[in-house]
Amino acid sequence: MPLSRRVFDVKRVLSLTVVGVFLLCIGASAVGQAPTAAPSQTAATTPSETVITDFSPPPDIAAKATAYRDTLHIHFFANTIYEWLLLLLVLAWRIAPKYRDWAERLSRKRFLQIVIFAPLFLLTLSVLDLPTTIWDQRIELKFGRSVQHWGAWWGDWLIDQVILLIIGTLVLWILYAVIRRSPRRWWFYFWLASIPLIASIFFLQPLVIEPLYFQFKPLAANHPDLVVQVEQVVRHGGMDIPPERMFEMNASTKTTELNASVAGFGASKRAIMWDTILAKATPQEALFVFGHEMGHYVLHHIPILIGIISLMLLVLFYISYLLAGGRLSRWGARWSIRSLDDLASLPMLLLLLSVLSFLATPAFNALSRHYEHEADRYGIEVLHGIVPNVNQVAARYFEKSGEINLNDPAPSEWVKIWFYDHPTRPERIHFVATYDPWANGERGKYVP
């Protein structure tokens, strides 16, 4: 399955806390270099090279990207409808009440009932959801974005389930504990509990979760010159990522996509370069994308997003609370749900959260696009004076990665609203190619 949607996607509505974690993992445009060369201090654009100001992939690649876009849109809406129908069928078949009854027969302790119920229910949803998950991987293989064979793919799927069961059981225990203790204000207390959970998962992701899927090695092992240049950019931006926390990730075992990230915070903060980028991008491009990733941290996008998304989650939880009572009054008996604190109410809550999170998608995307745009701006500014002709370096990288990643060459406005958590590729290329406050004697917005 696509790396950007690898973990928690199937059960993204198990808890919007998990959605929040991965929405907060913004960044990940790309980073890269030629195998061992250091960034040159000569001009990046020669007289023979065309100045890039717009995204214009070759006709064959543009046609393939358009076909990929259309297929993904069909998959997205079909998957959403299938998920809703699946949860409705789970309610109609009374699967959750059966698992609840088993749990209650095996133990009278609420915690043990959760430990029995949660894995059974979540694994059932995962198995029922397998058709769309497999379809997702088949799409990636068809368009050449995935190179992962099915044996390894199934291995990742099993890891997904283990992570889901561990986090899902914890989340459900917290959810039903607060519902029992405060039937009228559970939405508020569950929201409070979700904030440290988001922070914890964000901190643990690069240390615990990602190493389950990929191998990491020190970036300095094969790219010491790039590390030196990255350190120069780090000093210019006033940030601290020591060389021992710069890693190369073997993404090429699963994908052809170009990407990279800065992940975690505090002691877990690290720069991660995908080996696909290291093989296909230039050193100057590597530095630009690293500058972009730095921007998210230096500009405090992470805590700002945690705050804003947490408030959005509060609204969604409250609306779920308002809607849940009416649904129980009307259909609770038919679904064998005794009350909201009954474990059998879980599929109903998941359905409500799924619909609400779908409706909130444009707001989440717009928020993310804004901060991604500002990170692009920061990337240009922090490399100004370090990488010659940084505007064209950035534009050429976005053109190159856009062709490899099959980015949409001409997305419509509604496509951007529903599917883009980054600015569109044409928007990004035009901006980085033309952003030059220094030409008018002005200073950068973020970097002097």
Image: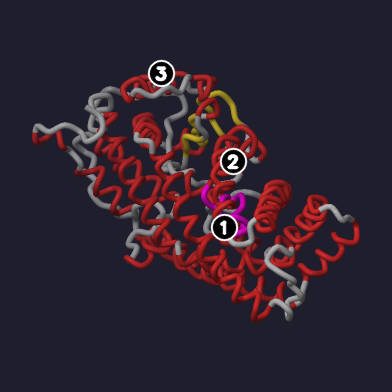
- Residue on which the image places disc 2: 201
Q: How crowded is mark 2: few (under 14 residues within 10 Å), some or many (20 or more)?
A: many
Residue at horizontal 61%, vertical 38%?
210
Q: In terms of sequence position, does the residue under pointer 1 or pointer 3 come before the other?
A: 1
Q: Are marks 2 and 3 in contact (CB under 8 Å)?
A: no
* Corner quadrant of residue 441: top left
The reply to whether the magenta stretch includes residue 11 is yes
- Residue on which the image places disc 1: 187
Residue at horizontal 38%, vertical 36%?
300
* Corner quadrant of residue 352: bottom right
For the stretch drawn in magenta, the main secondary structure is: loop
Q: Residues within 10 Å of mark 3 (few under 14, many from 20)?
A: some
Q: In terms of sequence position, does the residue under pointer 2 or pointer 3 come before the other?
A: 2
Residue at horizontal 71%, vertical 69%?
339
Q: What element carries label 3?
A: helix
Q: Name the residue type under label 3.
A: Val
The reply to whether the magenta stretch includes residue 321 is no
| First to last magenta residue range | 5-20
Q: Is residue 58 shown to the viewer in this render?
A: yes
**Mark count:** 3
Q: In this view, does 36 lie above or below 68?
A: above
